[in-house]
Amino acid sequence: MNSFDDAPISETIPPELREEIDELLDVFERDRQAGGAAPITAFLDTIPPALRSAVFRILLRAECEYLADTDRLPDVSSYFDRYGEFSAVLREEFRCEDEPQGPRSRSAAALRTEFTPDGSLEAESHQPRRVAAKATESLDGKSQSGPLAQRAPIRRLRESLRVAIIGGGWAGLAAAVAAVDQGLDVELFEARSRCGGRAGLSLTLPDGREADFCRHLSLGCCVNWLDVIERTGCAELLLPPDGTYRFVSRDGRPHNFCAGRMPSPLHLAPALWARTDLPLSSRWKIGTAIMRLARSGGNTEQSFAAWLAEHGQDSQTIAGFWAPVVLSALGDDAEHVSQAAARQVFVDGLLVSAEAGRMIFVRRTMGDAIGAVVRWLEAKKVVVRQRTVVQSIWPNGNGVSVATGAGIGHFDYAVSAVPWWQAERLIRLPDPSSAHEGARAILRRATELPVGTIAAVHLLYRRRWTKSAHAVLIDRVGQWFFAEADDRAIPPGPTTVAPPTDNGNVALPPSSINGGEGRSDGRDGTGHYQVVISGLHRLPTLTDAELIAKVRGELAAIWPDEAQSGFIFGRVARHQRAIFVSGPGVDQRRPSAKAFSDRLLLAGDWTASGWPATMEGAVRSGRLAVEAILEHLGRPASLLSPQLPRSWLFRLLFG
């Protein structure tokens, strides 16, 4: 729910610090509600000196916003007294015309005389930018006074049914697209500087290119996500579907897994036959187990490891086929995911048809697709409020109230599309009725969902060293290898690098990136590669430097050219709460869209979407939330896309 206020600022901060700052902003919110003081100083002491000024700017703005929300103004002099080392930031944020000679050059008394008796500022020049403006209207158009004045009011577009969507990830975006298509008046609130949620996280590499925090893979069976992409005109941002999975065995040999032309489920027979790294007996076991998995019902209480053991899958078979797919798709190993979740991955994703298992990637970054969806919404007159923190929402008579720093707005419906760990804090229930106690229990259970950690190891080289676009890595620390398509030339310079720094990045000599013009050799472009590690929380604790070294060693064992390709940069991007894990018994804790209220709906990949924690699950949840709104309006409609057609043979065998 909290945001990095300016994109240029956030890009200077390493990804490993962003989640810490987000969590600190959560502390700010809790501390504000308790009337305490936000702990800026203690946190700044842990930040590398070169980054403190940028981090301080973010925290300063958050603290000023919280003060404004409680009708208080900042004590300008105390900021200079406490944080004199950031005087340049303070002068800019408080718009000081004169330049103080030191942190105490302007006395507290002199500064306080600039406030009028009613507590407002006589002049704007010393007030923080996000607190300075005074609003003449609140969200619902009523006049206001006090320090919230002059903030831009949130206006009505039409006198029609108004829907607020809180959260701009795929769940919120899908809900907005569906609601607009149904003629509803939509306002979308996103706390960060741009929409996308966890799927939209990115980082900037030393050569200036932007890369996804973690490479995203979709499949042909993700029909709802693909429908949103098509409906909003983003299809050209996707690469053509790829039906060939390249499994790389322990000895480094690639083995293609590609569907044949026979009707499903026989289309997988050639793919299994081609896995010559596995004994023929193991391939037979895999084939028979997939067929049994299709015939079985989904068991949400049984672990997939237990199911595999019941059906004769030995350790070699599990490591060579089941484990990398389960880990990459569900974020944890077979012991900790349910049989039902794994069944969906293998049956819906591979068995139903050849089209279902085709891999789909965005051409560059997921942010491109997300940005295109946002532009489509804005063209449809949706108000997209990025960098707008929604502090709380609550049912209010025949509608829902939404509180931001600009005031309180009233909507006919609202969709909470925030992650599972934020929903309880966002939704406010002042009435202690038994019905609301049940709702609180739903939100509390959501905070207890098991969490999966995902990391991506980004590696940059002076030249490319493999033509493989992607590969499934067997029995290694990472499950997926990706080669980024957007390679760029890098100026010449030394190919040797300094030892890794404490944060796992490689310290580069200035000439490595900025040493001149032209390419380092005759081969075209630099090489940017990424290894995705799901279930990182199950591995021994490794520093970033250790993880980079381990991944590089495993890649060199597969592609010997890696060691001679001029490695210049490495970064580990970790997301501690990347997904929730669909473990045994977890589905019972996932609420439906209308489990909470008929007017305040829930969405997100963690809700009961019928899918695990994926982009498809998020999109389904957003559409289901709008379905619930239509049902409440007496206009029931099915908004989910139809599943891919099953072959006649599949229907004959499995119904």
Image: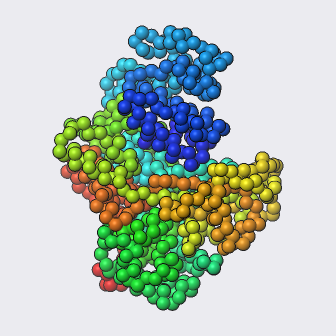
| Picture quadrant where residue 184 is located | top left
Q: Is residue 576 visible?
A: yes
Count of numbered tags: 0
Along the line of sight, the residue nearer the viewer: 162 or 556: 556
Along the line of sight, the residue nearer the viewer: 589 or 94: 589
The percent position of residue 572, horizontal first and vertical second, equals 60, 55
Q: Residue furthest bottom?
A: 280
The percent position of residue 562, horizontal first and vertical second, equals 71, 67
The percent position of residue 619, horizontal first and vertical second, equals 39, 56
Along the line of sight, the residue nearer the viewer: 94 or 63: 63
Check the image and report above or below for 279 versus 634.
below
Q: From the image, which quarter does the N terminus lie in?
A: top left
Residue at the (20%, 39%) spot, across then down: 432
Residue at the (41%, 29%) spot, across then down: 36
The percent position of residue 443, horizontal first and vertical second, equals 30, 49
Compared across the picture, whether 18 is left or right of 603 comes to right
Q: Is residue 368 visible?
A: no
Check the image and report above or below for 361 versus 401.
below
Residue at the (39%, 49%) spot, across then down: 421
Along the line of sight, the residue nearer the viewer: 541 or 331: 541
Which color mode does the image show?
rainbow
Q: From the image, which quarter does the C terminus lie in?
A: bottom left
Residue at the (37%, 76%) spot, across then down: 306
Q: Residue furthest left?
A: 434
